[in-house]
Image: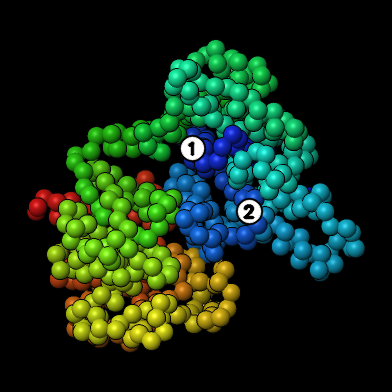
Amino acid sequence: MTEYKNPNTKFIFITGGVVSSLGKGLASASLAAVLQARGFKIRLRKLDPYLNVDPGTMNPCQHGEVYVTDDGTEADLDLGHYERFTGIPATKNDSVTSGKIYQRVLDKERHGDYLGATIQVIPHVTNEIKNFILSNIDDEDFVLCEIGGTVGDIEGQPYLEAIRQLAYEIGREKTMFVHLTLLPYIPTAGELKTKPTQHSVKQLQEYGIQPDILLCRSPIEIPQNEKRKIAQFCNVREERVITALDAKSIYHVPTAYSAEGLDAEVCKYFGLHAPLADMSRWRHIEKVTENPEGDVQIAVVGKYQLKEAYKSLIEALTHGGMANHFKVKIKWIDAEDVEKNGATSYLSDVNGILVPGGFGYRGTEGKIAAAQYARENNIPYFGICLGMQMAVIETIRHVAGIKNAGSSEFDANCEAVVGLMTEWDKDGIQELRTKNGDLGGTMRLGAYPCILAAHSKVALIYGKEQISERHRHRYEVNMKYEPLLLKAGMSITGKSPDGKLPEIVERPEHPWFIGVQFHPELKSKPFEPHPLFVSFIKAAIDNSRLL
């Protein structure tokens, strides 16, 4: 078993039961935030049972957003919650899938590391899971590990067995099991039902795991007699049956958990004496969100119908609103509808237009139409990744007059203003790609530096001339079109340090028209809103006052 540097590190394993999408990621992030508010150093990790090596090639309409870390790891969107709530950058060491686990096991078997042993789930797969949990730990007080999926899923069984073993090996005094479950409310009966929670805990116990704390999701307050009943049937102390009420905002959850005594019970369990949690900054966020000075409407012209596909984007817009003391109302617009029916009927009542990233041809003409509408009507426009590329194509087509301008991603016979990236520099090493290569993990991923043009709008917004932002793309705007773009009123104001890759475009004569090749939403936090989103929302507010 892997050894870790600090034997005093405590491990909290978060599991979920009854149904999926209960919010284990938010629960994990909120618990981490509250422990952090008590002065503890924490680390968050996600263990996903699916067999994909990572979510990079998964359909966002099924899986949701792919979150990207600075080091280029494609991971579950819950890592975004972890970063936003704690401010601690996630790394490749904080996300693992069954695909990665089995890949490591098979690589070792092929290499001969198992000395001819028969490879089995126990001990080889479970040992690899335990190694991941214990690896790359420094001086953290707590490591919180969220187990994806729902207790009872066949894919999750090796993870439950691994954490059961780990609790035995390093000691129950260093490990805690938190189980998130559901108390459904039956309106016709006028009561909460505890039976699903009882069954979920029973199933967890069948794997040899006794939960120490139950987080019970509920739409209403849980009566004390119901808590007593849950405690009795689930073998959990009554004070450790914690109500997890539906919240007005995800940023209300940490204070709600603290008020319910979650962090206090964690400290009691581990015998820790720590100052009370300082929740002042979270209360400030609550105050700002509950008392906005006004609201502003932003159109998001996208192609994915699942809002989880744009999770970080939603939060970054919210952060931009918080910084301006305004509530952001998002008007979701299907890019295909804009293609069919024109932009005016969908965009005439909005204060700002945001076109996010995406892959594939579907909806791209609608995104181009949205960029054209913003340009012609002086509406603040924010293009991210594909949204930047569509704005460039729109300018080349409708201002520069090259009617067949497009992207080689969609049309091999177009004037390829946007084309496949075949090489780029990463930390002094040349990265090479081919059209027929693997799709998984081959994009330009992670944090890259960008040099901003002096006196440009983006340099003013950032307050500096060199930045680092996270990327996830394999197509780029061709730099040879820079002179043509300049004549058409669009400037490339952000470039890679070698000047070969365009990172940011803007229209200097427009009130606010910026496109970025990277994903700024991935680095925005409630206490540190991303400057581009703060500026974009301010421009939208200014636009609303002109109407």
Residue 95, placed above or below residue 283: below
Between 271 and 493, the one lying in front of the other is 493
Residue 118 in which image quadrant = bottom right
**Disc 2, SS:** loop
Instruction: Judge from the rendering whether residue 443 lies leftward or rightward of residue 168; answer left or right.
Output: left
Q: Quadrant of residue 468?
A: bottom left
Real-space CA distance between mark 2 and mark 1, rounded to the nearest whole angstrom? 24 Å
Q: Which residue is mark 1?
A: 30
- The residue that appears at 45% across and 43% down in the rendered structure is 85
Front position among marks 2 and 1 = 2
Above/below status of 272 relative to 462? above
Name which residue lies at 44% across and 64% down.
470
Q: Which mark is residue 50?
A: 2
Q: Position of residue 195 (x, y in %)?
A: 60, 23
Residue at 57% across, 46% down: 44
Q: Position of residue 511 (x, y in %)?
A: 16, 64
Q: Is residue 276 left or right of residue 170?
A: left
Q: Farthest residue toward the right?
A: 116
Type of amino acid under label 1: Ser
Q: Residue extending furthest top?
A: 225
User: Which numbered circle lies on residue 160?
Assistant: none
Which class describes the residues within 10 Å of circle 2: few (<14), some (14-19), or many (20+)?
some
Relative horizontal placement of residue 167, taking residue 362 as reference (left or right): right
Residue 466 visible (yes or no): no
Residue located 34% across and 55% down the image? 530
- Amino acid type, callout 2: Tyr
First in sequence, mark 2 or 1: give its number: 1
Looking at the picture, tell me which residue is in the foreground, 394 or 540. 394
Q: Tag 1's secondary structure?
A: helix
The image position of residue 542, as x and y in percent, is 14, 53
Kindly indicate the quadrant of the structure image that contains residue 313: bottom left
